[in-house]
Amino acid sequence: MTLEEAPFYPRKKLVQKQQYFQKLSKHIHLKGRYDVVTSVAIPLALAGTSLFMIGRGIYNMSNGIGKKE
């Protein structure tokens, strides 16, 4: 006698999700609902912040702002 554990996710719903994702024409990493946030918005925010900080550092160096005496 073997006890089988029930699956975590019903097979019918899993097949529906697979069919949904296979029909989409977008790139794989942009298929989910919130995937655009993690793969596009966060890297853009990091790049924008770093460019701003680099620009501010160059401006401060060229004008001698923030130097210790």
Image (tube, rainbow, N blue to C red):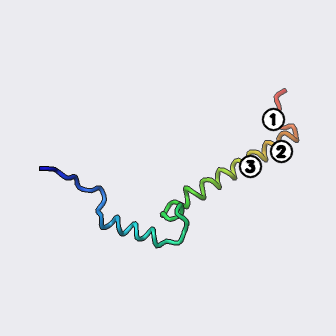
| Residue in view at x 78 percent, y 45 percent | 56
Q: CA distance from mark 2 to mark 3?
A: 11 Å
Query: Mark 2 or 3 closer to N-term?
Result: 3
> Where is residue 1 drawn, in percent x and y?
11, 50
Displayed quadrant of residue 41: bottom right
- Judged by depth in the image, the label closer to the viewer, 3 or 1, is 3
Q: Quadrant of the C terminus?
A: top right
Q: How many marks?
A: 3
Q: Residues within 10 Å of mark 3 (few under 14, many from 20)?
A: few
Query: Mark 3 or 1 closer to N-term?
Result: 3
Q: Which residue is mark 2?
A: 59
Q: What residue type is disc 3 on?
A: Phe
- Judged by depth in the image, the label closer to the viewer, 1 or 2, is 2
Q: In the displayed image of the protein, which residue is found farthest to the front? A: 1
Q: Secondary structure at mark 2?
A: helix
Res. 10 mark: none
| Residue in view at x 79 percent, y 47 percent | 55
Q: What residue type is disc 1 on?
A: Gly
Query: Mark 1 or 2 closer to N-term?
Result: 2
Q: Which residue is mark 1?
A: 66
> Where is residue 25 drawn, in percent x and y?
53, 72
Q: In the displayed image of the protein, which residue is found farthest to the top? A: 69
Disc 1 to disc 2: CB gap under 8 Å: no
Q: Nearer the viewer, residue 46 or 60?
A: 46
> Where is residue 43 drawn, in percent x and y?
62, 53
Q: Which residue is mark 3?
A: 52
Q: In the displayed image of the protein, which residue is found farthest to the right? A: 63
Q: Secondary structure at mark 1?
A: loop
